[in-house]
Every structure is written in structure tokens, then in C-alpha cells.
Image (cartoon, grey):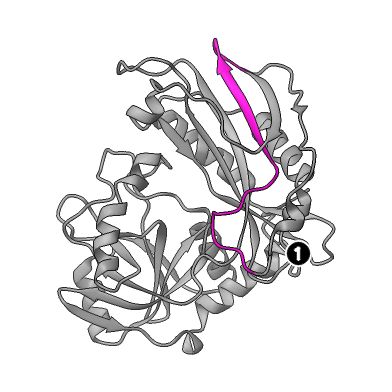
Amino acid sequence: MIDTMKIAIQQVNKTRVSEIDFANLAFGKVYTDHMFMADYREGTWKNFRIVPYGYMPVSPATPAIHYGQSIFEGMKAYASADGNEALVFRPMDNWKRMNISAERMCMPQIPEELFMESLNTLIDLDRAWVPNVEGSSLYIRPFMFSADEYIGIRPSLDFTFMIILSPVGPYYATPVKVKIETHYTRAVQGGTGYAKAGGNYGGAIYPAKLAQDKGYHQLLWTDGKNHEYIEESGTMNVMFVIDDVLVTPALSDSILAGITRQSVLDLARHWGMKTEERKVSVKELVSALEQGRVQEAFGAGTAATIAHIELIGHDGKDYKLPPVSERKFSPRAFQELENVKHGKSPDLFGWIHRI
């Protein structure tokens, strides 16, 4: 349920946008002037407000802190080619996925009107923060957490929904090195891997750090049962071009249904490329690497869009992939996605929401 959708706006006295060096943006370190907040109380969404970005009081008893009752989404807005509009990439898909996560975590559904109206109003207010620098964008972080003041284990009653905005540069500036993980697990069958729940990511930090200590940037996660099949790459979906076929692990309840992943598949099929969504075993991948049949490998996710993989490590051996300059599909897909997101290519699939 939702009360009448009227957003109260408390603007900052002075914007900080002139202080920002948009040509040198680190990911997730700079935030815009304002943030959106809404409360879920007594079965209804209410108290819609935009306030200056800043710290906020939270009960020390909230289950969000103790039990990880929190979910989030990641989206991006881009400056249009003429600089007059903010173009948001596939926001309705993020709204739908957030509600899938909410259901899994015993949280209320977020009405479409609440999600889209808050997004539109906040970005319109802070549109000066949308970078107009190549490779940069406005990262959008909607999230919801339990606002209960109760440390018993039960479905919470009260929640807070928020959106914060962050101008960002490229997530990965260069191709990445990854290691196939066969001990630690990101997600298991029957778990929360298909939801964007905070705990999924917190639990992945330690094994990723171990890999980074060995010179890798990230992990190729495998299934939690036998570590036999490839599932994801770090915080992204993973895709391969093997023998001119775009191959990616089939979705399951331990793999997030990535919006960038689906966009890349849509482009490949539109271009007439053969695609396969299926199980990809570690044995098959290593064999194809040894035979030189893996032409491309890349992660697909909102933060990085497409992150080229230059090397895959397994059992103490590193397998180098062809240089990005020799790859045919992923650079083309990356450039086409960039062109669509900035309004430079036709929006054939209806992906762009204009503000």
C-alpha cells in the first residue's frame, strides 16, 4: 500500500557540485547533495522526502545490522549526447528485481509509483551531478532495510527505503585477472544468491581478498555443492565466447539475474550471434582454455558494464586470453551499450528512461 505520493523536498543551502573534479572520479566515494527516504509503517509506505545527503539516526537494535535484513539495487544514469537529459538504463528491470529480493527477504513490495517517482524527482533535483565525461556516469543506489527496534528473529514490521546518488568513473580501468574459486562459496541452491541481499556481498569479501593477495583482481565463483560449475565473476555475471558462441551460466536460485547480462544477450541475438545459457563446468572451461578455444571472457554488471578478463587462474596455473584488441564481440557490445545509454544509438529495445 502507499499513501498519496507527494514528496517533501528540503534542499541544501549551497550545492557542492562545483567542488567535484568530474575528470577524476573514484567509484563510490562522492555523493550528490540530496537523498530520498520513505518509511513503511503499519502496512503503508508514507513520509516521502528528499533531504540533504548526510548521516541519519538508526536504532542499534535494527535487524538490518544484526541479521542483514537489507537489499539494494545498482543502476546508472548517463548524460545525453546534447547534455540536456539524464538517461537511466532499464530502471523498470531494477524495480522488478528489487521486489524479487524483497519477497525473498520478507520485506514489503515497493510500488512502481514510489520507485519511479522518487527516482525521477531526486535525479531531476541533482541533475547537475550527472557527469558529462567519457566513461563516467551517475551511479544510483536504491536500498531498503529493516527499521524495527527489535532483536528477535522474525519478519520485520517497519522498513526504510532510500536512494542515494554517486557520480563515478570507470569501475575497472584495465582488464582483470580472475581465479576459479573451488573452496569458498558465494551462494548455494535454496539460498539468497538470486536476490541482491547485503549479506551475499559481505560474505564474499574475505575470499576475494585472499585472491587479491595472490595477484588476482577477483574470483570466478563456482557452485556451492561440488564446485563443479562456473556461476559468477566477482560481483558480476560472467560470459565467454567459445568457438564463436556466446556462453553464459544459466540462471538459477544461486545466480543473480543481471540486467547487463540480459542486455548483452539481447544484443548478441539481435546481431545474429549464437548464444547458449547453460551449465559451464570448470572442467569444460579449463579444457577450452588449454585448447585456445576461449576467444573472450568478461564480467557483465551495472558497475562496470563489461569488464574484460585477461587471465584465468586455476590449480596454480594461469591461462591468458587473447588481448582485448583482438576480441570481436565484447568491445562491440560495450560500445553499443555506451552509445545507447548516451542516446547516440537508436534505443531499439526500449531500455532508456529519460529525465
Q: Is residue 133 above or below residue 146?
A: below
Q: Quadrant of residue 277?
A: bottom left
Q: Give the side of residue 178 with respect to residue 273, left or right.
A: left
- For badge 1, the amino acid type reads Gly
Task: Residue under label 1, please give it.
Answer: 343
Give the residue furthest to the bottom. 326
Q: Is residue 58 above or below residue 307?
A: above
Point out residue 225 in the picture as x, y percentages from the top left corner: 16, 50
Magenta span contains residue 320: no
The foreground one among 326 and 158 is 158
Q: Residue drawn at (33%, 39%), measured in percent from left and top?
A: 192
Q: Is residue 337 above or below residue 87?
A: below
Q: Give the side of residue 147 with respect to residue 350, left or right.
A: left
Point out residue 180 in the picture as x, y percentages from the top left corner: 24, 67
Q: Is residue 156 above or below residue 350?
A: above
SS for dot 1: loop
The foreground one among 289 and 313 is 313
Q: Quadrant of residue 114?
A: top right
Q: Quadrant of residue 191?
A: top left
Q: Residue drawn at (81%, 55%), measured in percent from left and top?
A: 85
The stretch of residues the image draws in magenta is 24-45
- Asked whether the viewer can see residue 230, the reply is no
Q: Residue drawn at (46%, 31%), measured in percent from left and top?
A: 102
